[in-house]
Amino acid sequence: MKNYYSVLGLDKGSSDDEIKKAYRKLAMQYHPDRNEGNKKAEDRFKEISEAYAVLSDKKKRSQYDQKVFTKSFPGKIFFVTLTSMKF
């Protein structure tokens, strides 16, 4: 699964305003009307738009964060919890 934060050049903790600003900047740069006939720019624009569609919607963003960041470190949370407990 793609890291939508990195697609927009952001970190996971980015604010809604930072997400919007990054999207607008990249959308202007890669918009098909500004890059006629450039398939790579068109594909990049679609990728940027997909990332923004998820990250700009609070519900979708929450689901995405849970899915991606839990999958990235499936055993780490359990391991940290066990190692921090005193027996």
Image: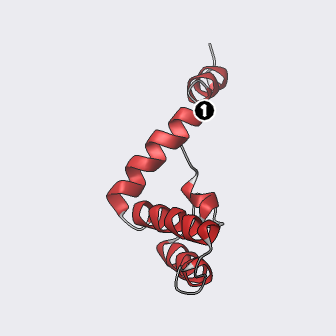
Report the side of 11 relative to 64 (left or right).
right
Q: 70 or 81, which is in the foreground?
A: 70
- Considering the numbered disc 1 on the image, is that residue within a helix, a strand or a loop? loop
Residue 57 place in picture, x, y as percent: 36, 64
- From what the image shows, is residue 25 above or below residue 59? below
**Residue 44, image quadrant:** bottom right
Q: Residue furthest top?
A: 87
Q: Position of residue 69 (x, y in %)?
A: 54, 41
Horizontal side of residue 65 vs 25, given as left or right: left
Residue drawn where x is 41% and y is 56% of the image: 61
Name the residue: 45% across, 40% down: 67
Residue 24 screen position, x and y as percent: 53, 82
Type of the residue with mark 1: Phe
Residue at the far left in the pictured view: 59
Relative vertical location of residue 57 with respect to residue 3 in this rendering, above or below: below
Is residue 36 left or right of 16 when viewed as pictured? right
**Frontmost residue, 44 versus 39:** 39
Residue at 53% across, 62% down = 47
- Give the percent coordinates (x, y) of residue 3: 58, 51
Rendered image coloring scheme: secondary structure
Q: Residues within 10 Å of mark 1 (few under 14, many from 20)?
A: few
**Looking at this view, is 83 or 49 the one in front?**
49
Against 61, is 53 above or below?
Answer: below
Check the image and name the residue furthest to the front: 37
Label 1 sits on residue: 73
Quarter of the image where the C terminus is located: top right
Residue drawn at point x = 41 percent, y = 60 percent: 54
Total labels drawn: 1
